[in-house]
Image (cartoon, rainbow, N blue to C red):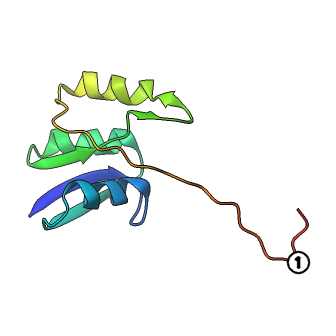
Amino acid sequence: MKRIAIQGELGSFHDITAHEYFQGEQIELICCATFEEVFENIKRDPTIIGICAIENTIAGSLLHNYELLRESGTTVVGEHKLHIEHSICCLPSDDW
């Protein structure tokens, strides 16, 4: 079973990405509060795979994550593009 470190919780975009990328495979997620924690897990245990966003259409390149990648000495071995849509929802009684 692959162990995957992600930033975020179950149901997060990184969780969705992990399940799509490793579709059909058994995976165990290691949920991390920060991207730094993702790279700490990879460094501590080389069998752990990290999933880390490095770009998005809202913020562009996530330079801090590129820096973490460079400093860690890890290598990018795959890429997954995840289409994200956000919806603003409210109750009919809410004042928008």
Which is more toward the observer, 28 or 79?
A: 79
- 10 on left or right of 22: right
Residue 57 percent coordinates (x, y): 51, 35
Q: Note whether residue 41 is visible.
A: no
Which residue sits at x=20%, y=65%? 28
Residue 48 percent coordinates (x, y): 15, 49
Look at label 1 and name its amino acid. Answer: Ser
Within 10 Å of disc 1 (Cα), the crowding (few <14, some 14-19, many 20+) is few
Residue 1 percent coordinates (x, y): 8, 64
Q: Which residue is mark 1?
A: 93
Which residue sits at x=19%, y=39%? 78
Q: Note whether residue 65 is visible.
A: yes
- 90 on left or right of 25: right
4 relative to 41, above or below: below
Which residue sits at x=38%, y=39%? 53
Which residue sits at x=42%, y=27%? 64
Q: How many marks?
A: 1
- Which quadrant holds residue 11? bottom left
Residue 41 percent coordinates (x, y): 22, 46
- 91 on left or right of 55: right
- Which quadrant holds residue 75? top left
Q: Name the quadrant of the C terminus.
A: bottom right
Q: Judging from the image, what secondary structure is the residue with disc 1 in?
A: loop
Which residue ends up furthest to the right in the rendered image? 95
62 relative to 12, above or below: above
